[in-house]
Amino acid sequence: MSAIPSHEELAQALGQTWHISWEGHPGIDVALIEVNQGRAMNPRFHCYDAVFRQPAGVDLPQHTYTLHSPNATSWWVMLTPIGPDDDGLRLLQAVFHVRTPAPALP
């Protein structure tokens, strides 16, 4: 298992139900509604983000949660509230800014 979900892993599960949990709580189901490319600070890095929709009546704070994918892979990630969607449901965003692997030498 990698330390963080890759852009590809997130994109493949776009529109699916994910699960977030935290210490002392079984967690909640959330929907992955966006996976976006970001702007990296330089060519040695790449940046992307994922946006999750919370169920009605839930408004979780910024926190480090365990994020569980639909295929049962899990990661420990920081999720930050970014406001409601057009229907008033609260959104959480994870931003990933990671070093690009060095190219293989011939």
Image (cartoon, rainbow, N blue to C red):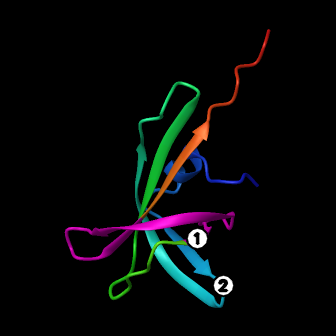
Residue 49 vertical placement versus 90 (above, below):
above
| Residue 81 falls inside the magenta stretch | yes
**In terms of image quadrants, where is residue 60?**
bottom left
| Residue 75 falls inside the magenta stretch | yes
How many neighbours does mark 2 have within 10 angstroms: few (below 14), some (14-19), or many (20 or more)? Answer: few
Say which residue label 1 marks.
64
- Label 1 amino acid? Thr
Residue 51 vertical placement versus 102 (above, below):
below
Say which residue label 2 marks.
23
The residue lying at 33 percent from left, 88 percent from top is: 57
Q: Which stretch appears magenta?
A: 64-92
The residue lying at 46 percent from left, 74 percent from top is: 30
- Label 2 amino acid? Glu
Give the farthest residue toward the front. 41
Q: Position of residue 61 (x, y in %)?
A: 44, 78
The residue lying at 76 percent from left, 18 percent from top is: 104
Give the farthest residue toward the left. 86
How many neighbours does mark 1 have within 10 angstroms: few (below 14), some (14-19), or many (20 or more)? Answer: some
Q: Main secondary structure of the magenta part?
A: strand
The one of 50 and 39 positioned closer to us in this rendering: 39
Element carrying mark 2? loop
Residue 49 vertical placement versus 83 (above, below):
above
**In terms of image quadrants, where is residue 7?**
top right
The one of 69 and 88 positioned closer to us in this rendering: 88
Q: Position of residue 82 (x, y in %)?
A: 34, 65
